[in-house]
Image: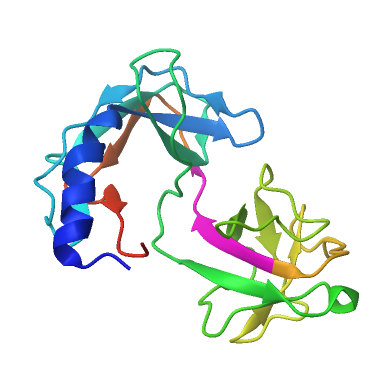
Amino acid sequence: MLIAAGRNALLTSGKAGFTHIGALLDISTPTQAAGARQAVTWQAAGTPAAGQAGNNGAISIPIAAGETVVATALWDASTAGNRLSLDPIGSTVKGVGSVVSAASDTIQSNGHGLTTDDRVFFAAVMGEALPAGVLGTVIYFVLASGLTADAFKVSTTSGGAALDITGLGEVQFYKTVPNVFASAGNLTIATNALLLDVNGL
């Protein structure tokens, strides 16, 4: 496990690769919003906290009228290049959950903080596959059915049938808040709202 100095050293050497951010209209392809990616400059490693580097100044991503932004992503180039992340917008809720019974289609996560109709997407826990039935390319709705402080179910539609989870395993989940742009505008990311965080290493 890296100590704070090691985490900051990792950030110092690696953060330069994350050069641009763009807005996504879906996460399945993913499809990028019409507005150009914006350059990202980073704070010194350890700012705002040990093991973190936040964006140095607000970033405004232009969004066209009629677009709905569901997430953001970091790239290593202003066009083309490699997508390096998939990040929620409008929320800091994220966590790790476990499917302990495929028969119940329920994800267990103590104090998850989600409510009915919250939108979430999933990613694999490091070194593991997603449980069978869960896709990392879909933004799901949290269902009222089966929702407790420590467990939740999801569906592809609001109030729809629970996702049929057919295998056991762990997931990382991220709450995102789709942002509908009725008219052209900007998705603004405040200083230090975008974080490279290596504290889990």
- Residue at 16% over, 50% down: 9
* Residue 37 shows in the view: yes
Coordinates of residue 162 in the picture (x, y in percent): 83, 65
Q: Quadrant of the C terminus?
A: bottom left
In the foreground, 151 or 47: 47
Which secondary structure class fits the magenta region best? strand
Residue 194's place in the image compared with 28, above or below, is below
Along the line of sight, which residue is nearer the eye, 2 or 178? Answer: 2
Q: Is residue 138 magenta?
A: no
- Which corner quadrant of the image does residue 91 belong to? bottom left
Q: Residue at x 77, y 53 (%)?
A: 157
Q: Quadrant of residue 26?
A: top right
Left or right: where does residue 116 sit relative to residue 188? right
Tell me the magenta residue range: 170-179
Residue 84: percent from left, percent from top: 43, 34
Residue visible at 12% across and 57% down in the picture:
46
In the image, 57 versus 48, the foreground residue is 48
Residue lying at 17% horizontally and 54% vertically, measured from the top left: 8
Q: Position of residue 7 (x, y in %)?
A: 22, 57
Furthest residue toward top: 79
Q: Is residue 118 something that shows in the picture? A: no
Color theme of the render: rainbow
Q: Is residue 200 above or below residue 57?
A: below
Between 37 and 17, which is closer to the camera in this rendering?
A: 17
Q: Was residue 175 drawn as part of the magenta stretch in this picture?
A: yes
